[in-house]
Amino acid sequence: MKQIYLIVALSAMLLTSACYSIRTAGNSGKVPPGQAKKGTGSKSARPFAPGQQKRN
């Protein structure tokens, strides 16, 4: 009985330790306004800031 318990316990540990997930940061892919300004060559970062978007 101890041998069966040991085998089950070892298999459970092996299966759960093999699973992993890759987590990325929540802001992945978003660029700060100043960096977007540099990338486009613009003189102002205002058009790239989220609070400065014009509404239609």
Image: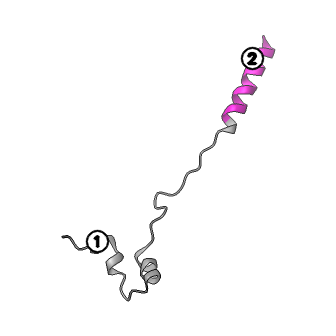
* Nearer the camera: disc 2 or disc 1: 1
Q: Position of residue 7 (x, y in %)?
A: 77, 21
> In the rendered view, does 4 fall on the left or right side of 52?
right
Amino acid of disc 2: Tyr
- Which residue is at the front of the view, 5 or 30? 30
Magenta includes 15? yes
Residue that sits furthest to the bottom in the current view? 43
Q: In the rendered image, which quarter contains the C terminus?
A: bottom left
- Which residue is at the front of the view, 38 or 11? 38
Q: Where is residue 10 in the image (x, y as percent from the top left)?
A: 75, 27
Residue that sits furthest to the left in the current view? 56
**Residue depicted at 54% across the width and 55% down the height:** 24
Q: Is mark 1 on a helix, strand or loop?
A: helix
**Residue depicted at 42% across the width and 81% down the height:** 37
Q: In the rendered image, which quarter contains the N terminus?
A: top right
- Residue indicated by mark 1: 51
Region in magenta: 1-16
- Which is nearer the N-term, disc 2 or disc 1? 2
> In the rendered view, does 48 fall on the left or right side of 5?
left
Q: Examine the residues drawn in magenta and state their main secondary structure.
A: helix
Mark 2: give few (<14), some (14-19) or many (20+) Cα within 10 Å: few
Distance from the alpha carbon under mark 2 to that under mark 1? 60 Å
Residue 5 got which mark?
2
Mark 1: give few (<14), some (14-19) or many (20+) Cα within 10 Å: few
Amino acid of disc 1: Gly
Residue that sits furthest to the top in the current view? 1
- Which residue is at the front of the view, 39 or 28? 39
**14 lies above or below 27:** above
Q: Is mark 2 on a helix, strand or loop?
A: helix
